[in-house]
Image: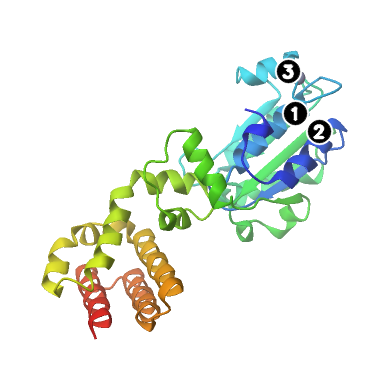
Amino acid sequence: MAFENILGNEKNKEILVRIAEEESSVHGYLWVGKDGIGKKLFAIQFAKMLLCESNSKKPCDKCKSCIEFNAESHPDFMMIEPDDGKTIKIEQIRYMQEKIAEKPITASKKVYIINNSELMTREAANSLLKTLEEPPSYAIIILITSNESKLLATIKSRLMKIYFKPLEEDQILSYLKANNLDVDITKNMLKQCEGSIGKAIKVLEEREKYAFIDDVIKSLSVDDITTIWRKSDVLYNAKDNIVPLLEYMGIVLYEKLREKNEIKYANGIKIIEKAKQRILANANYDMSIDDLLLELWEEFNS
Ligand SMILES: [Zn+2]
């Protein structure tokens, strides 16, 4: 995997290649952007370039450093992530600090990536701060986050911030095509992906549910309300993950609104938003879905 094979954020690629090739890296970075848009891939590739020992194009994929990196056995590289999916603990940061104190072995630098860095516990963050205040001369630390507001200001102020943008819809589509994943993704489903490959994959995994939402919206003007309630299992069964489906419903109506400019679609969007708020406030779930469908049906048939 090289930068050329990572989609989007071309300007960032140029900047990072330059930093690596001119050996002008700072000690700490903060990479900010939504989930699923390739920040981690960028960081891994940048690490490989920083560690590469070639004097010209980096990464060369030939030097000892590149070979060890590709074999995932580089002694001067480490990825720190929440090991339970929830938090990055102080033990993980301490272990990193022990390692960072040792001189590089293969390369002339050491690179540490802290993914989902907003999930560091308070103790972990405070401990990391000490390393960021006085990093060893060879150390480079990259913090990745999708929520920079959760990071300590004292940490952020010591890092060079790089923002990553969501991908364009045609970039997502070409990724899906290249990976043979583009089974019937509709324009509206692409909008639901919000420029994230990760989200696109989730949407495709649940494609049937999204297709069902399309159906329900069509049948609002055709069927009677009892038929709609009866066939809406997908909504009644989605209690644990209803928000993306409601958001998608909103997208479908918004696109209708743009196309036809009829007020019922604007009102429909408000009805969906209201239902979402009710559900998030722990109102009775089935009743909230009943009401949502009834209110939409009334709006479409008045
Ligand atoms: Zn190399």
Left or right of 287 in this view: 82 = right
Tell me the CA gap for discs 2 and 1: 6 Å
Tell me the CA gap for discs 3 and 1: 10 Å
Look at the numbered disc 1 and give the secondary structure of its residue.
Answer: helix
- Label 1 Cα crowd, 10 Å radius (few <14 / some 14-19 / many 20+): many
> In which quadrant of the rendered image does the N terminus lie?
top right
**Which is more foreground, mark 3 or mark 1?**
1
Pick the front one: 59 or 139 = 59
Q: Residue at x 38, y 70 (%)?
A: 253
Report which quarter residue 25 is drawn in.
Answer: top right
Amino acid residing under circle 2: Ala
Tell me which label, 2 or 1, sits earlier in the chain: 2
Pick the front one: 230 or 74 = 230
Q: Residue at x 68, y 27 (%)?
A: 77
Residue receiving disc 1: 49
Circle number at residue 65 = 3
Q: Quadrant of ligand 1?
A: top right
Amino acid residing under circle 3: Ser
* Residue 97 can be seen, yes or no: no
**Which is more foreground, mark 3 or mark 2?**
2
Pick the front one: 257 or 269 = 257
Q: Residue at x 69, y 30 (%)?
A: 98
Amino acid residing under circle 1: Met
Pick the front one: 29 or 296 = 296
From this view, report whether residue 30 is shown above or below residue 249.
above
Circle number at residue 20 = 2
